[in-house]
Amino acid sequence: MNYWLMKSEPAECSVDDVLALPNATVPWVGVRNYQARNFMRDGMGVDDGVLFYHSSCAEPGIVGLARVASPCYPDPTQFDKKSKYYDPASKRAEARWLLVDVQVLRKTRTLGLPELRAAPGLEDLIVLRKGNRLSITPVEPKHWRLVQKLLG
DNA sequence: GCCAACGTTGGC
DNA sequence: GCCAACGTTGGC
């Protein structure tokens, strides 16, 4: 059992958007970074905990609790010429990009960056590191517990 | 819109 | 394999 933080731009796919879907579950399309892909491929398992994070928006922060709801499988958008995630270099027999399904368990209040930065014990949370751009990052159990505590 | 950080690309 | 140029991310 591992824990993760997964970023989504709310203009693209917000926590409310996911809650409106059947089973509150969304295929996490569009990861085009090898490190993030490798986390899904090598680190994730069904039922892992996920902090749902809104980025590139007015109030960036954790907005929901979710779970990994499927094993990883090829991201279909890489083969879709009409998708902005299309990757002409990826072959069906050897898919380059993977995804997992993510199920939102509950929306939380917005735990914004200032509050996260101010929380004792969260200093090493990867998403708080300067210059961090990874859309999927591992979360240590102690950090997970602290976030649960902050959310009450 | 700015800009720091960092990933990717491609010439050599 | 090096590294400059370029593109993207994402907070502010």
Image (cartoon, coloured by chain):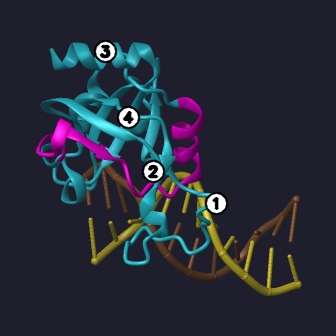
Chain colours: A cyan, B yellow, C brown
- Of the residues shown, which amino acid type is indicated by label 1? Ala
Secondary structure under tag 3 reads helix
Secondary structure under tag 4 reads strand
Q: Which residue is drawn at 11% across and 45% down?
A: A20
* N-terminal label among 4 and 3: 4
Residue range (magenta): A18-43
* N-terminal label among 2 and 1: 1
Q: In this view, does A77 lie to the left or right of A8?
A: right
Q: Residue A5 carries which label?
A: 4
Q: Residue at x 27, y 30 (%)?
A: A66
Chain hosting mark 4: A
Q: Distance between the residues labelled 4 and 3?
A: 14 Å
Which residue corresponds to mark 3? A146
Crowd band around label 2 with a 10 angstrom C-alpha radius: few (<14), some (14–19), many (20+): few
Give the number of the mark in front: 2 or 4: 4
* N-terminal label among 2 and 4: 4
Give the number of the mark in front: 2 or 1: 1
Chain hosting mark 1: A
Query: Considering depth in this image, is A91 or A138 the residue closer to the camera?
Result: A91
Q: How far apart are marks 2 and 1 (CA)?
A: 30 Å
Check the picture and name the quadrant holding the C terminus of chain A. Answer: top left
Rendering coords of residue A22 (x, y %):
17, 42
- Of the residues shown, which amino acid type is indicated by label 2? Arg
